[in-house]
Amino acid sequence: MKTLMKAVVLVAGAAMTMGNQKCEQKVQPTARSLKKIVDLGAIRSSPINFPGGQSFDFQFVANQQIYSVLLESKQFAFKYNPPIAVPPAQATGDQNFFNLSKADGQMMKAFAEAVGKDNYSLEYAKTAWCMVNLPQAKISGSVNSFELLGGGGLSIGFTPAGAYPVNGASLGFNVEFMQLDLSMVATRPLTSSVMAATNVTSKQTKTKVNLGINLGAISIGPSFYYQSPLAQVSKNGLAKAVNDLSTQLVKEEWYTRVMANHDTHVVIRGGSDVSLEVGDQLLIYNEDYYWEGEPCNSKYLGGGAAANTAVAKIEIDWVGDEISRGRVVQQTDENAVIGAKVKLYKMHADDYKAPDAGVTPVTPVQSESGSNSGQNSTKPSRG
């Protein structure tokens, strides 16, 4: 009996220990990675022909959907407009020089005015300013087939061989399955060389939808499409293609560009949109660019910088929506130029604490009538 009691106590003790260990386990934070800035080319597609002469512009909705897929991506940062709105020689004023959020635009101007630099056009005209506008990759693709499969062998859509014939088909039919095949590619913005490519097949996207369509009562357009299961199947295929590209591009080192150099601080492209945080450290490289003629207005022939030729190291001290500012912590005799390449040196440590804001604490001061008046001042004490 004593042996049995001892065994029960040991089992109970072990259970309590395991329970305590589970309670003590901390949830590990998800590793942060910087999003690569990408631009979007076209997603090409044939139209879909339906019985009764209706035709649906699938290319239009596919290009709409890829925007939302990229905006939801955890690996890519997508911006429709480049940060520099117009070539410096054509700029008519600093207010219209940048494509930035209102808050970022105000800070960009404030940073410049603080060091006596308020003529953006002059500053950018001296350098290869167009490098600032370039994404790290350009994404484009094509829908190779789109098929709506119904009962009795009915098929609507297209394949690489061409469109399915719909002459004589009934205006009312039921779609049992949908499938599409699409290809997507990421290329370098200046040379158009392929960085990554993927193909999502019909087998991977085939989905049961059970959708009834009566062409005698409805018109097939974007409104119908987005309210039907077809939109989700297409989006899933696009999302898989984007995810495949991002997996392949992990091998590509993240980088961004210098937008402004204010001596002790440097403003770079990319803020919270690329997951930069205060405390991150980055290295800046001035690259040699080779053009067939005028910089930014002729064919790019090549360029770059050696790995051991960084001209400065900065530590991010302010992060905006689409730009960040870094304090120069190390620098050579060479200043970072507009368009210089910026690479990650290291992210801040998990226990990193941002420097104190330097704001004077507010000391409540009671009014002369005493505490019973209920009117306490919140002006800072200068004592």
Image: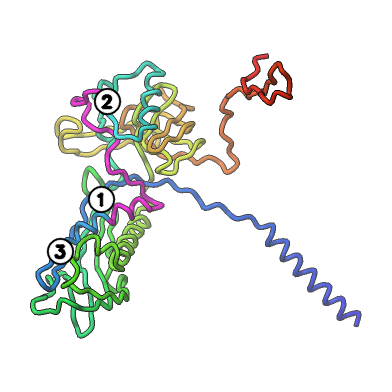
The residue labelled by disc 2 is 124
Tell me which residue sits at (23%, 58%) in the image: 61
Q: In the depicted view, which residue is nearer to us: 374 or 253? A: 374
Quadrant of the frame with the N terminus: bottom right
Range of magenta residues:
65-93
> Within 10 Å of the Cα at label 3, are there few (<14), some (14-19), or many (20+) other Cα atoms?
some
Q: Which residue is mark 3?
A: 47
> Which residue is disc 1 drawn over?
187
Question: Mark number for residue 257?
Answer: none
Q: Say if 329 sits above or below 178 in the image.
A: above
Q: Which residue type carries mark 1?
A: Thr
Q: Which sits in the foreground, 228 or 232?
A: 228
**Amino acid bearing label 2:** Tyr
- The image quadrant of residue 115 is top left
6 left or right of 186 in image: right
Numbered disc total:
3
Instruction: Choose the circle earlier in sequence order: 1 or 2.
Output: 2
Which residue is depicted at the point 32% across and 73% down?
Answer: 207
Depth check: 41 or 48 in front?
A: 48
Residue 139 locus on image (x, y percent) = 26, 52
The mark lying in front, picked from 3 and 1, is: 3
Helix, strand or loop at mark 2: helix
Residue at 64% across, 22% down: 377
Q: Is residue 298 visible?
A: yes
> At 27% across and 25% down in the image, what residue appears?
124
In the displayed structure, does residue 225 sit left or right of residue 103?
A: left
- The residue lying furthest to the front in this view is 373
